[in-house]
């Protein structure tokens, strides 16, 4: 079954009704709302609630962490120190992708499994009922621990281009110093 969305015919100009999976879901939702009113109503979220949910899913931190880090940095970028007011978008959360490549070790303890790993000189652990649960919990902890600070779009892009490599960044700084004034 092909899932098609609503479109307008180029020859006749007639708009067809959606016949795809999305329209099926919308009709199913409408039926559920008639059967059980109130249970399937859409909850409108504020921008802060949406942002909080996004930060939790993507980085493992919440909006409170973001606001605390922004205050800690003096409401400015962590590298160039330009204030947030100069930018239309909020600062990006700078995070290390190295936590994804770590080798997790496991150990049976009692009726559970301990998952542990050393990351940036600190030991992180999580106990779960089984190996999968322990690994999932540990990865969530590591995701939050990988967040370093807040950066403006320019500095965030620059770190990405230099692949978070301090040696490459130092070489770039040295190059700029050598050619300053030319």
Image: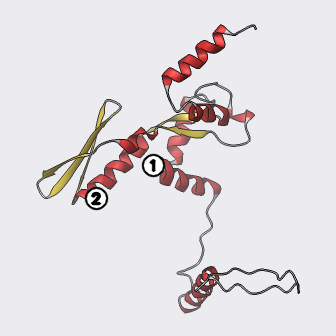
Name the residue: 31% across, 29% down: 121
Name the residue: 46% across, 37% down: 96
Quadrant of residue 21 within the rendered picture: bottom right
Of marks 1 and 2, which one's residue comes earlier in the chain?
1
Quadrant of residue 32 within the rendered picture: bottom right
Where's residue 181, x and y in %? 75, 7
Question: Foreground mark, 1 or 2?
Answer: 2
Q: Label 1 belongs to which residue?
A: 60
Q: How is the image coloured?
A: secondary structure
Where's residue 159, x and y in %? 57, 31
SS under mark 2:
helix
Instruction: Report crowding for label 2: few under 14, some 14 to 19, many 20 or more residues within 10 A (C-alpha).
Output: some
Where's residue 65, x and y in %? 50, 42
Residue at the right extreme of this rendering: 12
Residue 133: numbered disc? 2
Residue 81 position (above or below residue 113): above
C-alpha distance separating marks 1 and 2: 16 Å
Q: Of 155 and 68, which appears nearest the observer?
A: 155
Name the residue: 37% across, 43% down: 101
């Amino acid at each position: 079954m092909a899932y098609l969305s609503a479109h307008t015919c180029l020859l006749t100009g007639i708009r067809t009704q959606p016949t795809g999976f999305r329209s099926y879901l919308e009709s199913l939702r409408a039926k559920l709302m008639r059967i059980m009113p109130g249970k399937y109503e859409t909850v409108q979220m504020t921008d802060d609630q949406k942002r909080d949910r996004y930060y939790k899913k993507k980085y493992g931190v919440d909006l409170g962490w973001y606001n605390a880090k922004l205050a800690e940095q003096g409401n400015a970028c962590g590298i160039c120190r330009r204030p947030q007011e100069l930018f239309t978008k909020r600062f990006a959360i700078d995070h290390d992708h190295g936590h994804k490549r770590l080798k997790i070790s496991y150990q049976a303890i009692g009726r559970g499994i301990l998952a542990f790993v050393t990351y940036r000189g600190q030991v992180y652990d999580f106990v779960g009922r089984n190996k999968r649960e322990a690994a999932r919990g540990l990865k969530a902890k590591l995701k939050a621990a990988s967040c370093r600070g807040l950066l403006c779009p320019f500095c965030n892009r620059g770190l990405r281009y230099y692949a978070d490599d301090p040696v490459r960044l130092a070489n770039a700084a040295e190059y700029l110093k050598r050619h300053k004034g030319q």
